[in-house]
Amino acid sequence: DNTILTLPENIASGNQIATLKVEFVKEGSTLTFAGTTASVPAIQVIGVKSGRLATTATALTATELAVESGVVGLDVATLNAIASLSDSVTYTLYGDGTLNKALPGTTPVTIASGTVKPSAANQFFGRTVTINPGATLDVNGFAQACTVTLAGGTLTNTGAALSDQSAWQTYGITLTADSTIGGTADMRSLNTNWAAHTIALGSRTLTLDNASKLYWTNASIENGAIQVARGTLDIGYGWDKDTGWTKKEAEATLRNVTLTVAEGAKLTLNRGMTIEG
């Protein structure tokens, strides 16, 4: 069940503990590492129930994390403290924080609460990242080549602009609940090598509340509603690396989409656009 484990500073010295085995006896319960400076050896999560690892320790270090089965939840501080992460774990992230490492493998990631920021490009490479209600993925000015499921959360960029060769790449965006794309800096959705990708609205409403510009390049935008509340939505626009990063207009399709543009906001539809009812 929910437990606070206060660790002495020398828990890993003198071979006192080789592996700290954790079994969650109640689904969704939490083990919190406490203490001043806690050094944990290998952590092995056993059993079939999923739970969460958290820390209130001033400084926590851990050698590795292995998960027998299920889904393990980690606050960002705990994840950052673990030197070696399993490439087969399905991660659920909690709390505000900036990742200090790329996640290994390509298993799905869920951001359950708080605002999670990468500190480098492609820390979510090749994954499906689900953003739950009340949670935020702030790409923080770093391109992330991944697939995004907006499940009521927010995708945003408060770092450097991502509008040209530093574009935030995506293999697609899917809505499973009304969601938001926001931020204070440019963002651009562009698949690898200009390949087509889909923004599947799923009969939901996507609100765009970005103080700058959002570019959708070679995208099929389907089945739902888009509200441009602030900033500019530019569809079919991009930069061509083969011509020295000059402006390029690419194909894009709006299919069964209701568009609403608020006063002061802007919608730009470029050549090559197809609009279908």
Image: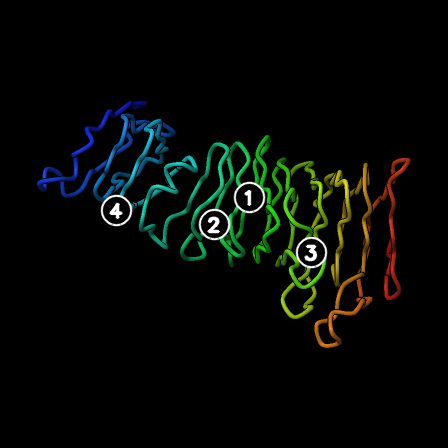
Of the image marks 2 and 4, the number of the one nearer the N terminus: 4
Which mark sits nearer the N-terminus, 4 or 1?
4
Front disc: 1 or 3:
3
Give me the disc on residue 189.
3
Classify 8 as above or below 164: above
Q: Position of residue 7 (x, y in %)?
A: 22, 28
Q: What is the distance, in whole Å, between disc 2 and disc 3 at their CAs? A: 20 Å
Q: Residues within 10 Å of mark 4 (few under 14, many from 20)?
A: some
* Residue named by callout 1: 130
**Which residue is painted at 69% across and 40% down in the image?**
183
Left or right of 11 on screen, residue 54: right
Q: Quadrant of residue 238?
A: bottom right
> Separation of disc 4 and disc 3 at Cα?
36 Å
Q: Which mark is residue 108?
A: 2
Q: Furthest-bottom residue in view?
A: 242
**Picture residue at 27% right of the left edge, 31% below the top:** 37
SS of the residue at dot 1? strand
Identity, as a three-letter code, of the amino acid under mark 4: Thr
- Which label sits in the foreground, 4 or 3? 4
Query: What is the C-alpha distance between the residues marked 4 and 1?
Result: 27 Å
Contact, mark 2 vs mark 1 (Cβ under 8 Å): yes
